[in-house]
Image: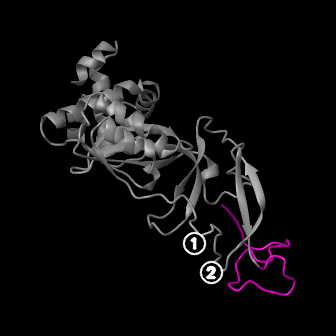
C-alpha cells in the first residue's frame, strides 16, 4: 500500500518507506527524540532490517531523519493512516459502532511553558514565543476529576483523535493550535472520516466539551446515530424563584429589582440583596459579595 503512493509523489520509495517504518517504531517504543530512535536501531539491527534499512551500511544520520520529518508532506502520513484504518476495518478488527473523540495538549518547545520560568506575563496572548511563531495560547485541565476546576495555561497545539471505543485504535486525527475549541472541529472530523469509513448508525461518545446542539443534530440527522455526552452546565445559574418571577437569595429571601443592564444587545433585569440599602443589617448568609467595597450586596442578573 505504501510504495505505490510514495512512487506517485516522485520520491525514492525505498528509503522513504524505511524511514516511515522507523518513525512507527519510534512511536511504538515511546521515544521522544530521534537520537533515542537511532540508538535503538543501532542496538537492534534486526528491527532496522525489518524497517527496510541495509544493515550492512551505516544507518541514516540524525539530520537525515530530521529533514525527512520537517520537509515531507503531511498528506502522505495521513494517507498511510487512512489506508491502515481501512485495512483493519476490512479485516474486522475495528468498526465504527462506538466512536469517541477527545483532544490532548501538545506543548510548544518554548521556555514560556517551563514551570520554573519567572518571566512576567508569559501567558499573555500578545507575548508570542519567539521560538514558535505558529503556536497559540490554550488551556487544559490539570486534573481528570470532574469536580475540580484546576486549569493550566500553555503555548502550543491540540491533537484531536477519533477512536474506536471497542479496540481503542485511532481512526482519524487532526492537529490544531491550542486556541481551537474541541467542539468547533468535531463536525469536520466526522465528515472527513465518513469520506473513507462509513459512520452510519454510530454512537458518538465525548466529554462535556462536546455538549453542543449542532453535534447532536448532525450525528442524528446525517449519520443516523446517537450521542452519549454529559451535560455541560457552563456556569449557568438557576436560582429559585417566586411565582411572580422574583429570584430568591441563598437564605430564601426575595431579592429586589435594581435597574437593568444592557450588553451585546441584550437587556437584563438586575436584582440585589433585600438588605442592600440597610445601614445596620448584615447579610444572613454572609455572602462573599456582601460589602465588597461598594454599597452593594448580592446582585443577580436575570
- What main secondary structure does the magenta stretch of the protein show? loop
Specify the quadrant that holds the C terminus.
Answer: bottom right
Answer few, some or many: residues within 10 Å of disc 2's Cα (few below 14, many 20 plus, some between 14 and 19): few
Numbered label attached to residue 252: 2
From the viewer's side, name the closer residue of 106 and 208: 208
- Residue drawn 36% across and 32% down? 191
Which residue lies most toward the front here? 244
Q: Secondary structure at mark 1?
A: loop
In the rendered image, residue 18, in percent from the top left (x then y), is placed at 28, 29
Instruction: Where is residue 47? Give x, y as percent.
Output: 22, 40
Nearer to us in this view, 121 or 132: 121
Label 2: state its secondary structure.
Answer: loop
- According to the image, what is the colour scheme of the structure? one colour
Residue at (21, 51) in percent of width and height: 166
Residue 272 at least partly seen: yes
Q: Which residues are magenta?
A: 275-302
Q: Looking at the rendering, in which quadrant would you find the N terminus?
A: top left
Residue at position x 45%, y 27% in the image:
67
Say above or below: 269 vs 187: below
Which residue is nearer to you in this view: 261 or 254?
Answer: 254
- Determine whether 267 is above or below 45 in the image: below
The answer to if 97 sits in the magenta stretch is no
**Residue 24 on image: x %, y %:** 30, 38
N-term-proximal mark, 1 vs 2: 1
- Image location (x, y in percent) of residue 226: 30, 47
When asked about the image quadrant of residue 89, the answer is top left
The residue lying at 47 percent from left, 45 percent from top is 182
Which quadrant of the view contains residue 231? bottom left
| 159 in relation to 285, above or below | above
Residue 214's disc is none
Residue identifier under label 1: 240
Amino acid at each position: 500500500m505504501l510504495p505505490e503512493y510514495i512512487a506517485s509523489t516522485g520520491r525514492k520509495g525505498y528509503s522513504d518507506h524505511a524511514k516511515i517504518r522507523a518513525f512507527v517504531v519510534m512511536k511504538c517504543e515511546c521515544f521522544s527524540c530521534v537520537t533515542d530512535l537511532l540508538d535503538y536501531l543501532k542496538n537492534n539491527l534486526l528491527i532496522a532490517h525489518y524497517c527496510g534499512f541495509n544493515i550492512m551500511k551505516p544507518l541514516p544520520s540524525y539530520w537525515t531523519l530530521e529533514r525527512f520529518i520537517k520537509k515531507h508532506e503531511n498528506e502522505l502520513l495521513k494517507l498511510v493512516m487512512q489506508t491502515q484504518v481501512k485495512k483493519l476495518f476490512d479485516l474486522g478488527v475495528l468498526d465504527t459502532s462506538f466512536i469517541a473523540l477527545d483532544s490532548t495538549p501538545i506543548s510548544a518547545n518554548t521556555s514560556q511553558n517551563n514551570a520554573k520560568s519567572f518571566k512576567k506575563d508569559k501567558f499573555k496572548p500578545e507575548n508570542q514565543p519567539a521560538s514558535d511563531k505558529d503556536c497559540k495560547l490554550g488551556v487544559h485541565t490539570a486534573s481528570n476529576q470532574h469536580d475540580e476546576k484546576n486549569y493550566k495555561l500553555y503555548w502550543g497545539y491540540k491533537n484531536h483523535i477519533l477512536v474506536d471505543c471497542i479496540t481503542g485504535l485511532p481512526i482519524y486525527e487532526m492537529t490544531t493550535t491550542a486556541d481551537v475549541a474541541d467542539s468547533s472541529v468535531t463536525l469536520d472530523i466526522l465528515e472527513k472520516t465518513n469520506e473513507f469509513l462509513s459512520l452510519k448508525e454510530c454512537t458518538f461518545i465525548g466529554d462535556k466539551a462536546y455538549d453542543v446542539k449542532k453535534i447532536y443534530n448532525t450525528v442524528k440527522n446525517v449519520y443516523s446515530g446517537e450521542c452519549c455526552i454529559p451535560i455541560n452546565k457552563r456556569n449557568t445559574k438557576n436560582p429559585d424563584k417566586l411565582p411572580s418571577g422574583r429570584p430568591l437569595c441563598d437564605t430564601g429571601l426575595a431579592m429586589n429589582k435594581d435597574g437593568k443592564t444592557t450588553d451585546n444587545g441584550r437587556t437584563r433585569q438586575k436584582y440585589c440583596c433585600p438588605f442592600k440599602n440597610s445601614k445596620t443589617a448584615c447579610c444572613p448568609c454572609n455572602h462573599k459579595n456582601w460589602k465588597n467595597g461598594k454599597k452593594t450586596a448580592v446582585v443577580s442578573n436575570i
